[in-house]
Amino acid sequence: MEHFNYYSYLSATIAYLLLLPISLIGVKKNPVALPFFVAVVFSLVWAGTIAIFSYRNTLSTSDVMPFETLRNTALLFLLSAIMAHQRYEGNYWLLFRSHTVKLLVVLTGFIFVLEANAKFRYPIQQFLGQDLRLFAHVIFAILGLMLVEQIYRNAVTGFRWAIKFLCLGIGGLFIIDFIVYSKSLLFSKLDSSLWDTRGFINALIVPLLAISIFRLQSESIKISFSRKIAFHTTVLFGTGLYLILMSLAGVYIRDYGGNWGEIAQIIFIFLAILLLLILFASGKARALAKFYFNKHFFHYRYDYRDEWIKLSKTISQLDSINELSSFIINTLVDLVESSGGGIWLKNEQDDYYLAEQNNLGFTSPQLVYSHDSLIRFLSEKKWVIDFVEFFDNPEVYEGVDLSAWYAEEKNVWLIIPLFRQNDLEAFVVLTQARISRRLNWEDHDLLKTIGMQLTNALALSHASDALSRSRQFEAYNRLSAYLVHDLKNLVAQISLIVKNAVKHKHKPEFIDDSIATLENVVIKIEYILSQLKKGNVNQSNKIVVNLPEIISDVAQQQAGNRPALQVSILGADTLKVFAEKEKITAILGHLVQNAQEATDDEGKVCLELSKCDQYAVIKVIDTGSGMDEKFIAERLFKPFDTTKGNAGMGIGVYEARDYILKFSGEITVDSQPGAGTTFTIRLPLVQQ
């Protein structure tokens, strides 16, 4: 079609001309009205210039490329203004204070001069064998797409509605530019069809930009940048730029290397890729990149939200004090990009011992005493000791002897105190950073804040270890208490035999009862010894037992006590439950004995067994002194709380409830002062 390029760019010119007054609508409401207006003006000039040259049939890419560079610069300025709106509070000229923006301005100016001045361009083009203008416009497109991606990715959900069409529109412009110039760079020839089509594409994109103007008036700019994503995107862009430059250099070496050109090109590209891999693997290079990125792109050096989430997530996954010590070192090492470090923890004598180290790199004291000047200094000042500052201004640290912490190479860098409630719990020593840097107020504040959280985690770990040891002692004490309780009951039975022997030793019935009692004592002692050999006196060894037989055994054991035990078995002669024969016998015997001790000789103690639904019901009933509700609620089931003075252990009823609950049963108490007590035990029957 004749004059296709003219009509194409004429349509773009008309579209931008119509967009120009729209871009001025609601200037006070639109937070990026001025950058938007500038971008529209330069786009209009670019499209109009190409349309005029096309109409005169004098179109030359060399004549219009400078205008395209100005248009691209204006679009990048618009995107940068949107990204930096929150940081500079709408004063976009502050963008030019950034060293990165200054560098981009210089490069853009160099490209503009290169395109506008043929005498300057030709020698460079002949020397390189490549048209740098094509390469420059590919970089423009990549940079623009990177900014569009960052803006849309980091915009809050509500603000995406306002910038959606803006990102689609400007992103579409840079995509078609990337296709045009990358193909031209690949084949060293500009594709006229793609070039001419761009005018219509620009005209089609203008309505998207117009919609964005109206939407930006009703929405404030809300973009929350992720440093991690922004950093990785920048690294990706830099990597792509590096590879493109190396490829161009390889082409130059091939074309001008003579007979060895192709071999030299392969070796050069291999070395370039190897260098790139070395940089990726270098901790120092990564630290340097992060340092300059955070310094020139953000107000603050650290992403506090990211640091907080990462710290909290890792602390929650730690299990032991050794893991925590290593984690504290690695956290502080990564935070300031140090090479290594060690941590000194406070012991029971309030001295500090080296608990963990990671690439410490110098001979350090293994133990620092509490009276050491370093400990006094840290406790009083609560400072982070910076050895760079110490070597420059030693008078700042007057009164503290730090000679033991550095050798001639001066590898030590920081000593960071870890406080909890004004007590120095530990301190961390870090070696020199991978890159030379000085700490500022932000570093000190973050080190102290993270130090407090690490100290809390350290204190929690110490408390957890102390609780674990306490539980071990508790288990040991509980074992001892149960043994003493069982032995006390056995001694009481033997004592009763000895007490009555003087009066009844000549009676055969007494001798038979005594032998039976001693036999029962021997059985119980053997049971206790067997449990001790297994390592747990409370180990469960449940079997099916017949409760009527257990009731008979209890009645036989308590036959010598007063008042006499009355036994009542209601219903079936067989009521089977899961239990331990010796244990359930001892528990019921203890409850009966307590009832007999609480009841006068003229009173009544009864042991009843019955069936209710799928449960066996055991009741121990007495007419003794009884208990009030407060005593039952607060003291009855409390271990080691006894009303018998030195004669009691205070664990019998507690042990009974603990055991009954273990076998899915329940125990209840019904008692009134002066009206007696009824203990009711319910155990599930074995299903036949």
Image (tube, rainbow, N blue to C red):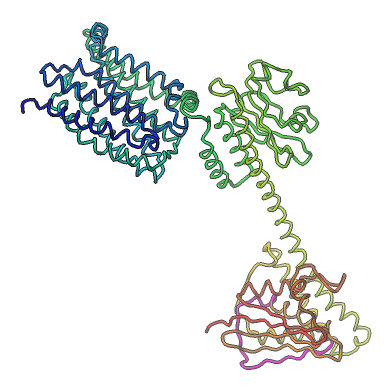
Q: Between 580 and 266, which is closer to the camera in this rendering?
A: 266
Q: Between 353 and 110, which is closer to the camera in this rendering?
A: 110
Image x and y of residue 679, in percent: 72, 82
Judged left or right of residue 177, residue 631 is right
Vertical position of residue 268 compared to residue 431: above or below: above
Magenta range? 560-583
The quadrant in which residue 103 appears is top left
Judged left or right of residue 579, residue 87 is left
Image x and y of residue 28, in percent: 40, 35
Q: Between 542 and 325, which is closer to the camera in this rendering?
A: 325
Q: Between 625 and 266, which is closer to the camera in this rendering?
A: 625
Image x and y of residue 370, in percent: 78, 33
The quadrant in which residue 391 appears is top right
Magenta span includes 483: no
Judged left or right of residue 578, residue 270 is left
Image x and y of residue 104, in percent: 37, 20
Q: Residue at x 66, y 34 (%)?
A: 343
Vertical position of residue 315 compared to residue 490: above or below: above
Vertical position of residue 552 compared to residue 661: above or below: below
Quadrant in which the N terminus appears:
top left
Q: Residue at x 24, y 28 (%)?
A: 178
Vertical position of residue 124 compared to residue 583: above or below: above
**In the image as oriented, which residue stretches furthest toward the bottom?**
571
The quadrant in which residue 196 appears is top left
